[in-house]
Amino acid sequence: MLRILKQILVSYDDLIMDRLTRTKIYPSKMRKGLGRHVRKDDAEERFCRGRKVYRRGHRNRKIKTVFGVLDMRVRRAECLTCGSRYSPLLNALQVAPYSRKETNVEHEVTEAVIDTNYRRLIEGRSIDISLGGVHNIVVGSDIDKAFQDRIPAEDLSGIMADGTGVKQHKGSKGELRTVIGISQQGRVVPLGSFVNDSWPEIENVVKARIKGTTDYPIPFVYDGEPGLDDFLSGAAEVQRCTWHAPRGLYHAL
């Protein structure tokens, strides 16, 4: 698992550096979210707007993960705008500069692999990972414990919920229901995934994870599924999705 994790991170590091150095090939939209860093010698620690860098070698980094100690070399970059030197990979993974124990590594890698439909981690790279490999990463991590922490309501800009049918043992039908939040920064905040639990039961779990809802009412968007009309009532402002209605009416509209 450490070898898989290291190979994924090395390739991700290469991809980030390519996009930050070859700006004529990669437009700004392909560099979105990459290369964020604090301006050099800024007392207020404000972020720099520069997204083009020089390569400045590597540095060794050891990080304790749930699979063991990960020992790898990470690329160093120097910003052309402010001159700050930093590691784009560690910034992308939100790893603190001198931290030695990180849970973000497993979470970010899991999300990155899931986004590729379990086929290839990075487009144009020859790194294949099987469904079993992804499963081992998820099972071996403490991802379930991390998603039990309470979330301040002011950190969320919206909540969404949806359900779908799934096949179970011996062909029986089950129901998979998922609730996610959207942070003020536009990132996905998992609030819970449930199998064969009713929406009222799920509502109690989600309400328990969000604190301060009375002071910060959150928009709750859903597709009109039965059972969600009063979901999170008193904690969120319910809103029907404006796309699902015309989609469901077809020619009748």
Image (tube, helix red, strand yellow):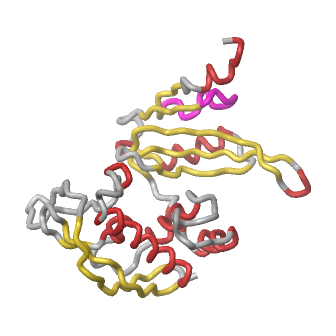
For the view shown, which residue lies furthest in the right direction? 170
Magenta residues (range): 223-234
Name of the residue lying farthest toward the front:
24
Find residue 80 and report its horizontal and vertical position in percent. Answer: 16, 64
Q: Give me the residue at 40% from left, 43% from top.
A: 156
From the top left corner, tell me how far across and down residue 29 is, in percent. 36, 49
Q: Position of residue 200 (x, y in %)?
A: 65, 38
Q: Where does the image place residue 98, in percent across and percent down from the top left?
A: 28, 78
Taking the image as shown, residue 170 lies to the left or right of residue 160, namely right
Specify the quadrant of the image occupied by residue 78: bottom left
Within the magenta stretch, is there residue 226?
yes
Position of the N terminus, as image quadrant, is bottom right
Q: Magenta stretch: residue 22 in it? A: no
Count of marks placed on residues = 0
In this rendering, the answer to whether 32 lies above or below 243 is below
Residue 152 vs 170, above or below: the answer is above
Foreground of the two, 251 or 106? 251
Q: How would you classify the magenta stretch by its main secondary structure?
A: loop
Residue at the location (58% across, 59% down)? 116
**Frontmost residue, 234 versus 145:** 145
Looking at the picture, tell me which residue is in the foreground, 72 or 147.
Answer: 72
